[in-house]
Image (tube, rainbow, N blue to C red):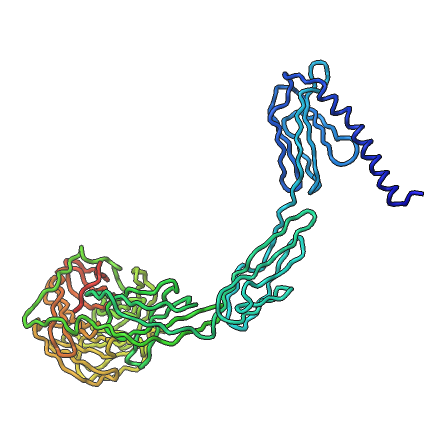
């Protein structure tokens, strides 16, 4: 007797032979009548996911017959009126034979064309919860992967990062590697692979070396050596008042240099990396010194005009009007982002501070007590205070008003060592400069007089005084439209030259990133402006 398995094989062979025999008449019919007038042309069969589409050229008949041969049994036959036919749920990995014919005038199938296609496995989509992992040694992350087949994980460098069978990644030491995630193929889908980039950072970063290059009159370039793993670099400047190096700017880690205004001081650079809200830092570099041009600038015994600043040399930051009756701008200070104007009324009995941003938009306003004529004002970032002096022509007083810059509220006034109509704070040396008439006084941060400078030229009334890089910027209005900014080096009292402003009465000036910002009553008008030089100015 035949075994059961042998019987099954014989039965399958008989059925297969029967299908082939039954298919012969269909093939014979379409090939029996080969009428070139009705020949199918350009039959192409393509696969898109589970769909198979057959397309052919139009030969000008109303109907076409499509035969689909697949597996056992008779072919599927359909009549279509167009020039395409689709199977929307094709079996993956199976062979399909698609034949297109057309009936001739006698009703016989003819002009057949047949194409065989074996469906490819589908592209598997693999979804990962992360494309990149950044962290510090010892950090762990869970990577979730979704695909059709079995998911596996593999680290390409186990020394940098390990990964478990379930996708938990552990950072072991600093470095870069990838985790390869694979979704195994199935009967219908191909293998799929993706990589997760892993950056493992150390507990601390290296220290860089810094140098000063490209020294010009107004700017210099700080250049440093790149530090591995740094995402940013902090530029720090020594603050004399606090005896600390404080950050002044952050540079993207892809860069290793920064062009800055030539501001007197000592500078350092520190590498940082901020990852997942956690920041690590390297040690600060050794300091480098940027020397202001004023230290070696030539001095003059007589009036020396460095440049004439006309309206074409200035940008208008804002036309300012004050508010209410408090509409006379007397002096200006600068907090790093806002120009703070001290306004009074014509009698000097009411005072306000109104601030403007760098684009001239009004930001804050506060009515303040004890402002007096407010002929001079300045801001000290170390104390957070605005200092306003009251002396103006016939008003002689040593009293200085104090205001909190953040809240714009009055604090208790104090007594200065000298009667003064101008005041400025110089961050480069932690000094205050006081001016009145022909006199300039240099004080420490406690307003104790350290030095006296006698103005060598232009003994006219000093409206206010500015400060920058160890230079006192004396704002002098001579008469009419004639004003000057006379510069004196405070270390030795040397006169370094002047800027001539033939556009009106100068009230005050500050320096913003190397640009002169001027408070001016424009000639021939009652209008007041904040002007800014179009280019950085050479302040020796």
- Quarter of the picture containing the C terminus is bottom left
Which residue is nearer to you in this view: 507 or 397? 507
What residue occupies the far right of the structure in this picture? Answer: 1
Q: Is residue 465 above or below residue 123?
A: below
Q: Is residue 149 above or below residue 497?
A: above
Is 280 situated left or right of 86 in this image?
left
Which residue is nearer to you in this view: 349 or 536? 536
Which residue is nearer to you in this view: 13 or 75? 13
Residue at (34% x, 67% y) in the render: 364
Is 481 situated left or right of 18 in this image?
left
The picture places residue 52, in percent across and down from the top left corner, at 66, 36
Residue at (16% x, 83% y) in the render: 451
Asked where in the image residue 350 lies, by quadrant, the reply is bottom left
The picture places residue 384, in percent across and down from the top left corner, at 32, 76
Q: Is residue 446 above or below residue 284?
A: below
Task: Specify whether residue 374 is in view.
Answer: no
Residue at (68% x, 18% y) in the render: 34
The picture places residue 338, in percent across and down from the top left corner, at 31, 66
- Quarter of the picture containing the N terminus is top right
What residue occupies the far left of the structure in this picture? Answer: 302
Which residue is nearer to you in this view: 143 or 179? 179
Asked where in the image residue 250 lies, by quadrant, the reply is bottom left
The picture places residue 36, in percent across and down from the top left corner, at 64, 17
Is 520 situated left or right of 158 in this image?
left
């Amino acid at each position: 007797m035949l075994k059961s398995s042998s019987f099954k094989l014989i039965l399958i062979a008989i059925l297969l032979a029967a299908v082939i025999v039954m298919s012969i008449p269909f093939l014979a019919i379409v090939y029996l009548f080969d009428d070139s007038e009705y020949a199918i042309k350009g039959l192409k069969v393509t696969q898109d996911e589970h769909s198979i589409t057959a397309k052919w050229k139009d030969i000008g008949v109303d109907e076409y017959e499509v035969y689909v041969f697949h597996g056992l049994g008779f072919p599927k036959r359909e009549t279509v009126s167009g020039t395409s036919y689709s199977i929307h749920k094709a079996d993956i990995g199976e062979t399909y034979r698609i034949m297109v014919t057309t009936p001739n005038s006698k009703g016989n199938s003819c002009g057949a064309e047949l194409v065989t296609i074996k469906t490819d496995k589908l592209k598997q989509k693999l979804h990962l919860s992360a494309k990149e992992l950044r962290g510090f040694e010892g950090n762990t992350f869970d990577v979730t992967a979704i695909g059709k087949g079995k998911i596996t994980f593999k680290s390409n460098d186990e020394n940098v990062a390990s990964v478990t069978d379930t996708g938990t990644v552990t950072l072991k030491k600093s470095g870069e590697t990838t985790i390869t995630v694979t979704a195994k193929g199935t009967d219908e889908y191909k293998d799929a692979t993706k990589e997760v980039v892993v950056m493992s950072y150390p507990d601390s970063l290296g220290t860089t070396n810094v140098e000063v290059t490209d020294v010009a009159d107004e700017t210099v370039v700080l250049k440093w050596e790149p530090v591995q793993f740094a995402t940013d670099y902090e530029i720090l400047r020594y603050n004399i008042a606090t005896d600390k190096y404080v950050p002044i700017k952050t540079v993207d880690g892809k860069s290793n240099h920064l062009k800055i205004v030539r501001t007197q001081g000592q500078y350092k650079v520190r590498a940082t990396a901020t990852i997942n809200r956690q920041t690590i830092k390297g040690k600060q570099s050794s300091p480098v010194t940027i020397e202001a041009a004023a230290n070696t600038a030539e001095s003059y015994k007589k009036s020396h005009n460095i440049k004439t600043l006309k309206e074409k040399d200035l940008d208008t930051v804002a036309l300012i009007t004050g508010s209410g009756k408090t509409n006379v701008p007397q002096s200006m200070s600068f907090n790093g982002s806002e120009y703070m104007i001290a306004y009074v009324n014509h009698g000097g009995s009411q005072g306000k501070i109104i601030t403007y941003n760098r684009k001239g938009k009004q930001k804050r306003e506060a009515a303040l007590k004890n402002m007096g004529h407010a002929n001079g004002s300045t801001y000290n970032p170390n104390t957070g205070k605005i200092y306003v002096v009251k002396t103006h022509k016939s008003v002689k007083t040593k009293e200085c008003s104090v205001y909190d810059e953040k809240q714009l509220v009055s604090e208790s006034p104090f007594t200065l060592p000298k009667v003064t109509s101008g005041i400025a704070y110089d961050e480069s040396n932690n000094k205050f400069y006081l001016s009145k008439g022909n006199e300039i006084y240099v004080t420490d941060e406690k307003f104790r007089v350290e030095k006296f400078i006698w103005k060598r030229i232009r003994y006219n009334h000093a409206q206010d005084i500015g400060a920058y890089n160890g230079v006192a910027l004396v704002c002098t209005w001579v008469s009419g439209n004639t004003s000057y900014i006379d510069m004196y080096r405070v270390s030795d009292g040397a006169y370094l030259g002047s800027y001539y402003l033939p556009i009106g009465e100068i009230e005050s000036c500050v320096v913003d990133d190397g640009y002169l910002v001027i408070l001016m009553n424009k000639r021939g008008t009652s209008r007041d402006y904040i002007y800014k030089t179009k280019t950085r100015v050479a302040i020796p």
